[in-house]
Amino acid sequence: MNSEKVSVIIPAFNAAKTLPEAVYSVLNGTYHNIEILIVDDCSSDNTAKVAAQLAEENPPVQYFQNQQNYGVSKSRNLMIEKATGDLIAFLDSDDTWEPKKLEICLKILKENPDIKAVSHALYYLDKHGQKKSYIPTYPTTREEMKAIEEKGELPWSFPSATIIYRETLLKEKGFREDWPVGEDTELFARIAQKYGLLATKEPLANYRIKGNSLTDKYWLKKRIANDCIKENQKRRIQGEKELSLSEYENTYFNNLPQLKKLNKLRELLSLHYMRKAGQNWLNQDFLPALFFGVLATGLNPQASMYKLKWMKQNKKLSQES
């Protein structure tokens, strides 16, 4: 397994402040058969200068610059094409890896040769870069893999935690570039269903809380995207044509009876507010956390209580890890 080369893809947009820490977290790892491909997506800050300097000073690092702003999906797909590694690992420009991440993940793949993707748990980083909470992952066993298939659930894997064989990504044509959000969840669910994805509970990367991310801005479309992904899982099993995100939104969500649609929006908005409450709490912004928590509970008390139990369980897992 040590002979297998890993290509680490880092899309960067206005990431001058965090990019060096991300890159050096890979370079300082225990697995050295790597290349790092940074692609600057037309940043307006000093990302290009920082990336070029990193490439000049570190032979494993290569720097590319898009001619126009393509977005994260196309940027990643372009780098998958240029990569020369056997495996593709993704890293967001404001996240970091733990030193043994690649070593541990490649060991899992070696022990499970039929699996084409691997993932792991993470830690949340607050706005000061401090580890604050544990982010679980799923599936971590063969039994959980089977449960995902039977129940039509989605694997829980973040981009900075996921490694996939390049051959598999090329066969699947990578990320779907017409998805403005949820493109990572869609790809990882597709890979998991068709080729297998297995994860470890060990936190091997650090995920920075992104309060102004696209997921936060397009929260409703992200929730609809998850439903679309589940629908496409069923369609693949039944041999039916898969739907694009816009097709699903127009066919299913927009055509719901008004009362059902309002109830669905209430549930989704509650989840969104609970997520924002959690983000603010981890950043020790307690007043906004309380505000969004009250809103979430008012909209959907049952879901909010479930989320609180989930957070309590994560705290326990964090203490055990």
Image (cartoon, grey):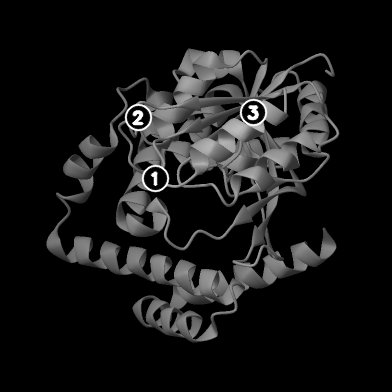
Q: Relative to 218, say whether 93 is above or below.
A: above
| CA distance for labels 2 and 1 | 22 Å
Is any part of residue 197 visible from this angle?
Answer: no
Q: Identify the mark nearer the N-term, 3 or 1.
A: 1
> Residue at 28% of width from left, 62% of height from top?
264
Quick one: SS at disc 2?
loop
The disc at residue 44 is 1
Which of labels 2 and 1 is toward the front?
Answer: 1
Quick one: SS at disc 1?
loop
Amino acid at circle 3: Ala
Q: 156 or 53, which lies in front?
A: 53
| CA distance for labels 3 and 1 | 19 Å
The residue that mark 2 highlights is 177
Amino acid at circle 2: Glu
Is any part of residue 168 visible from this angle?
Answer: yes
| Residue 136 locus on image (x, y percent) | 67, 54
The disc at residue 55 is 3
| CA distance for labels 3 and 2 | 27 Å
Q: Identify the mark nearer the N-term, 2 or 1.
A: 1
Instruction: Count the labels in the image.
Output: 3
Callout 2–callout 1 Cβ contact below 8 Å: no
